Amino acid sequence: MDGGLIARRYATVLYEYGMDKNKTADIYDDVNMIRNAFADAPKALELLASPLKKASEKKTFLKSVFDGKVSAETSEFMSFVVDRGRVDMVDEILRVYQVVYKEHNGIKTAEVTTAKEITDAKKADFTKQLESKLGSKVEATFKADASIIGGIIIRVDGKQVDRSIARQLAEIEKKLTV
């Protein structure tokens, strides 16, 4: 069976379970925290995926790392994933949960690139402007890339607006060489 389909099914089950318990937002916060923890410690995912480790060892590991930091519902789901032998897919399942949650709650994802790092206040202000423009809540990530020289590149749910100086210079160069 397709791994993406499996991840979608498990993520949907988690979302529906959260709906039953009125905890979808708490689970979403837990999922973000867990994915960040796994990104910071990729060896943890390798340990969980190892066929040499017993399910009980994997559950003990998860409990030791996340106990008291995630909701009971998230903890139960993680145990469920281990019991079902899908722990090798846990990061993908959690990533898809983020997508499912955003779909159900009308949240758009934005990636904003600027030439230099901007302050947290400017990030918050820019996010508010995007929310106003798009008419929905926006989760924005910001990164700096000196190669764009100046200006901004905004990607929202797969669409891009490139107002960078580098792109503008490239267009001028193209017009001059034709």
Image (cartoon, rainbow, N blue to C red):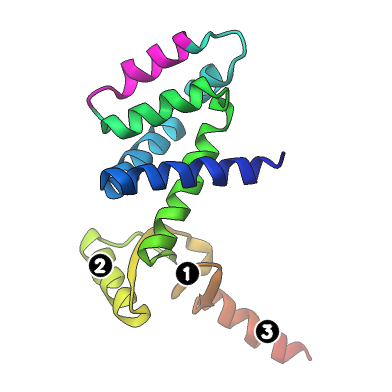
Tell me the residue at 45%/9% (across/down).
56
Q: Specify whether 75 is left or right of 6.
A: left
Lower position in the chain sequence, tag 3 or tag 1? 1
Give the foreground label among 2 and 1: 1
- Label 3: few (<14), some (14–19) or many (≥20) C-alpha neighbours in 10 Å: few
Q: Name the residue tied to disc 3.
A: 173
- What residue appears at the point 37 percent right and 42 percent down from the top-left corner? 17
Say what amino acid the circle numbered 2 marks.
Answer: Lys
Q: CA distance from mark 3 to mark 2?
A: 32 Å
Q: Are marks 3 and 1 in contact (CB under 8 Å)?
A: no
Q: Is residue 171 above or below residue 80?
A: below
Tally of numbered tags: 3
Question: Would you say residue 62 sits in the magenta stretch?
Answer: yes
Judge by depth and name the residue closer to the eye, 157 or 17. 17
- For mark 2, give the secondary structure: helix
Residue marked by disc 2: 122
Q: Secondary structure at mark 1?
A: strand
Of mark 2 and mark 1, the one earlier in the sequence is 2
**Badge 1, how many Cα within 10 Å: few under 14, some, many 20+?**
some
Q: Residue 175: image x %, image y %?
A: 70, 91
Residue named by callout 1: 156
Start-end of magenta stretch: 56-68
